[in-house]
Image (cartoon, helix red, strand yellow):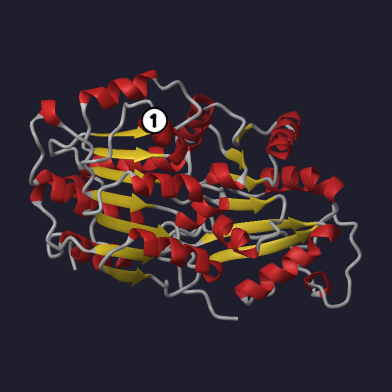
Amino acid sequence: MTFKELGVIEPILKALAEKGYTQPTPIQAQAIPVLLKGKDLLGSAQTGTGKTAAFTIPILQHLAEGVPPKKQRKIQALIITPTRELAIQIDDNIRAYAQHTDIRSTVIFGGVKQESQVKTLKRGVDVLTATPGRLLDLINQGFISLKNVNHFVLDEADQMLDMGFVHDIKKILKKLPQERQSLFFSATMPKSIIELSKQILGDFERVNIAPQQTTAERVDQAIYFVPKKNKTKLLVHVLKTEPFETVLVFSRTKHGANKIVKKLSQAGIQSAAIHGNKSQNQRQKVLNEFKDGKINVLVATDIAARGIDVSQLSLVVQFDLPNVPETYVHRIGRTGRAKASGNAIAFCDKDERPYLKSIEKLIDQRLPVVKHEFNEVVAEEGDSSSAKPQKKSYKPNSRRNSNSRNKKKSN
């Protein structure tokens, strides 16, 4: 199966070839034909499966066949996403796929002054990617009209609800034309998401991509039992002794992220933090430096990590275990994207052991325990920490070619 066989037009095919896309991913192969027919779509797929291309390519193709004169450009496609980073990433992809067409796109988000965004909107755009707050703000100021929108995408719907955007989304829905193509994407499908999808979709088809291997199966994982006071020392030890080129460290709080960066700096390790208290310019600068290899270690909170798209990320470190087990899986998915393998380690103090039990129940695995010199925790009967620890340090697969890696044996 090729993109040409899916019916993609030549200008977009040329852009895809320049991006190095050879064959469509499963979600692209299933979604693109449905969307080219103009039907609504309910999509469920994990991060890194090629979801953005799956919904943007058909939209761009519809628009490419009827881009109006430049002076009459109105917003015809609207994409809503929860974070600035993800919005920027989507717009970057749209610009790449549409580079051989006459389609104009832009992105708007909060946290920065609106003047440049308003100036771009006044020149006219065909595709708008936006975060909910800034979109509603500019609508209320009269700078944006949604009456010409023919294609509407709600991306990362579960994260939208987690972040409290449900009321904003409902306000936006009221401003959209009834006649439109609607696309709804969510990594998980709890009852609240299903109910929201019913308010958005008309006659729709459903695409559910269940990978041959779950994220937990693709990613080499390990657990380090360690007192909270020794976590930073352990992180320094791992970063200085293991051959990881790009490391994403998850902190539970913004303050914690800043503290980790400070401690790493004192140990001679260059890193940077990304979280909601940073300005958009600061966040984008750090992300670009991380992607370009100027910074090897990025410390992030969960919300800020949405939209981080770094190919072959070497290691994910869960400095703080999350109290929601699905968050653990989303975190390690930053390194095990699509069919790629990855590495992930987690630090667990005594107060986090209930979180670990929930995580292991969800992924149906016992995480291998790494023995190390910073552990002062006494193993408790029935915990993973009572399992026989590895005698050697964690051996990453970062030097392996993720595309040629042998399939991991099931436990």
Q: Does residue 215 sit above or below 163 in this rendering?
A: below
Q: Quadrant of residue 98?
A: top left
Q: Residues within 10 Å of mark 1 (few under 14, many from 20)?
A: few
Q: Does residue 344 sit above or below 99 in this rendering?
A: below
Toward the viewer: 37 or 10?
Answer: 37
Q: Quadrant of the C terminus?
A: bottom right
Q: Residue at x 12, y 25 (%)?
A: 71
Q: Quadrant of the N terminus?
A: bottom left
Q: Amino acid at mark 1?
A: Asn
Q: Position of residue 195 (x, y in %)?
A: 45, 65
Toward the viewer: 33 or 321?
Answer: 33
Q: Position of residue 399 (x, y in %)?
A: 51, 55
Q: Residue at x 89, y 72 (%)?
A: 380
Q: Position of residue 408 (x, y in %)?
A: 51, 74
Looking at the image, can residue 138 be seen? yes
Toward the viewer: 190 or 26?
Answer: 190
Q: Does residue 84 sit above or below 364 in this rendering?
A: above
Q: Report the side of 16 relative to 262 (left or right).
A: left
Toward the viewer: 291 or 390?
Answer: 291
Looking at the image, can residue 396 be seen? no
Q: Residue at x 55, y 41 (%)?
A: 304
Q: Report the side of 45 relative to 386 (left or right).
A: left
Q: Residue furthest bottom?
A: 411
**On the image, numbered disc 1 is attached to which residue?**
140
How many callouts does the rendering have? 1
Q: Secondary structure at mark 1?
A: helix
Q: Position of residue 296 (x, y in %)?
A: 56, 38
Q: Report the side of 243 relative to 393 (left or right).
A: left
